[in-house]
Amino acid sequence: MLKQTLNNKRIVLLGEQTHQEGTVTKIKVDLVKYLHDSLGYNVLVFEDNFYNLYDLLRRIEGQELLINWSGYFDSQWTDNEEFYSLLEYIWECRKNGNPLEVYGFDSQFVTTSNTKEILESLHQFLNINGYQLSDTEINLLDNFLQLLSTHHHSEIRDTNLIKDIPLLLNKLEGVASQATKPYQDKDSNFWMQILRMLQEQATVHLAEAQGIKEPVQNPRDRMMANNFNHIAQMFSSEKIIGWGASYHFANLPEKLNSTPVTEDYIIRMKEFQEEDFQLSELDGAVPMGKLLKERYGENLYALAFSTYSGRYGHDEQTYNVLIPPPGSLEQNAEKSGDFCQWIDFRSGEICPPFYASPLGHLPIKAEWSEIFDGIIFSRAVAPLTTLNKQQVNSRARQKFLTEKEHGLILNAEDKTPVPFVNIGINNTPYGSSSNEKGEFEITLPKAFLEDSITFSAIGYKQKTLLVKAFLEKSEKHIFLDPELLVLKEVLITGEAPPSVSYIIKKASSDKKDNYGIPYCQELFYRSTAYDSSDNIESKLEAVIDFGATQGHRLYNEKQFNRNHVAVIKQIRNVNGLSNDHVALPYLYSMDITTHQDGPLDKRNNKSYHFSLDDISSFEGDTVWVVSFRLEDKNLSTYNDNDPYLTHFSGKLFINKKDYGIIKYEGSMERKLPRSVQHSNDSSVLNFRVSTVYQKFNGLYYIKYGKIERKIENWPMRNGKKKVEIMTTSFCEGNQIPNAKEIHKINEEIPYNPEFWRNYNILPDVDIKK
């Protein structure tokens, strides 16, 4: 039915009630995909900036569309997940050789951010076509553009300016009409349209200064219709989709009737929207939809949207949809039980007046078949979903990746592997790590070809290469030069280090400066289970958004689980045998900086024996290597009130510069309690932990963590489990949509092989090369 109706139309206009319905935006995105893929609609024109979006796909790289889209589109589109999915589709179409052209038709094209660019571009266009603007003309244009950028919705009172500007604009339009050379792909037709809009706006503002004001938004709608026609002429053989507010796409607003029912709804809506609107304000209205209908007739199909219930809005400002009145289109459609319906007014006779709410969710009695060609009804709507821009930037950059690179990091002197090396692109949150055999994998965004990639590890000189140079290496072997400082040599020089007690107290007290704020990070997770003969039983991998809702602080294990949240983005059983699950509580054991009663809990430093064993280096800074051993077994470092802990020791690598922990190695042993079935006095649980931290935006995060748990002398089961995590990107804040506490996360995620082909994972030491 939809195909039969729309296949032969030249133009389809997709309206929306308020620009703030997430559900409607999703439906519209699906419609755009269908119209482009199946019915050959190849041009998409938004109620958005005519200047910024003009010839968009040819002026920018596809990457910029997905990463810097907010520099082109208005904020009403850019801050929600639903609209961003459309940008991803537009990029895919361009990449696959079936582009969906993107333009804007809004006449409100002068903004505070593009005023200078418009003037400079116009100046250059005129100059290369033989006309040099005088200083007086430049000042006149600049003043007019500045006024327009801040007075779109109010009167401009500088009558001298708006009397002088039309003469100049008329002259410049004549110059543009004779121009033959484009400037930055903007040709004479484009500039003539820009100058006509400026001329129209000057005329409107001059009339308003003289007390003559047109109804509603008629001047804007008239200019938007002209812009739409201009684009339609550019693509005279193409079918076009329009995207905007339903009001602007309406045909005959005089068919709207003011009734007591509508007035009552206006009063009720004013209580929460605080807008003083009267239907009489639409008297004399001529929306662009009416002008377009007069021009294109039956070749144009205008669709509005309506709903029965739900909420609309954005962020914290959302509003309830008031239940429509009895006998309304929405009441009748809701009774059918269908979530979504298309009501086609063109398939039958003209309908008598009835109530419907496609304009701002306000029930109005009207001959709706004379105003729109059809209405899409959704049973309920939800607000727009706030976009996490750091997360979508990460998602976008994944679409512009080089092939996955495999490499090996070696000691430059003895050619032995260097484990747990931090690998990062300078000044970005993107990177990888080497595993315990020095192996690494990384997939680099093409946007970073001119940037640098850095390899850094404790005890080695940092190495930095251009990304382009790294990619050109036929063999990705990275050699790091040792930079070892021996404690005895330091003492001989007379530069005695501070006492070990001072180092530990300083590391404990400075945690608030080195960690602190709520955060989120994207993690690669792998868990591997082995039997008593070290044969792999199962292997599970996942990519997870993980965050601390309260920021950095001391926790016991239960508190850690409650105050950290996560959501699984992808998960896979590597060998197809896994009955395992994602066990993020292991991160508590990896992060020594959060351990309540741990060696960095300043309340219990005296319960540990500390020793300054050595001095090393990291990224040019001195590193104190401090060993510790728990001597007071009454403390709990693994679980609450743990009487079974028999051993806990390790090493802390502490940066002299800021006393941040850059590496932690630990081992722990605890007896299995008698309450565990078939345990005996020799049944033990051993843990070995290795964690590397990395600084990003002035704060430390876990870059790589590994924990190995081994059960010995337990008749029920002997074996080992290894859990590894690697941070693949960082972000500030802790806003993770749909996240749950880490012990409650949902693992029912559809498998996506394409995701894994491009994703940076930690090389698996169990895979034989």
Image: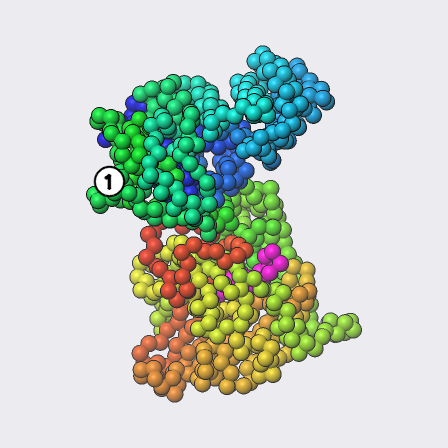
Pinpoint residue 596: horizontal percent, then vertical percent: 52, 76
For this rendering, which residue is in front, 399 or 232? 232
For this rendering, which residue is in front, 498 or 389? 389
For this rendering, which residue is in front, 158 or 227? 158
Q: Residue at x 57, y 76 (%)?
A: 601
Pinpoint residue 580: horizontal percent, then vertical percent: 34, 65
Q: Secondary structure at mark 1?
A: loop
Mark 1 Cα shell of 10 Å, populated few (<14), some (14-19), many (≥20): few
The quarter holding residue 194 reads top right
Does residue 718 appear in this view? yes
Q: Residue furthest bottom?
A: 681
Q: Residue at x 39, y 41 (%)?
A: 266
Q: Is 696 part of what is drawn in magenta?
A: yes
Q: Quadrant of the C terminus?
A: bottom left
Q: Is residue 507 above or below residue 202?
A: below
- Residue identifier under label 1: 327
Q: Quadrant of the N terminus?
A: top left
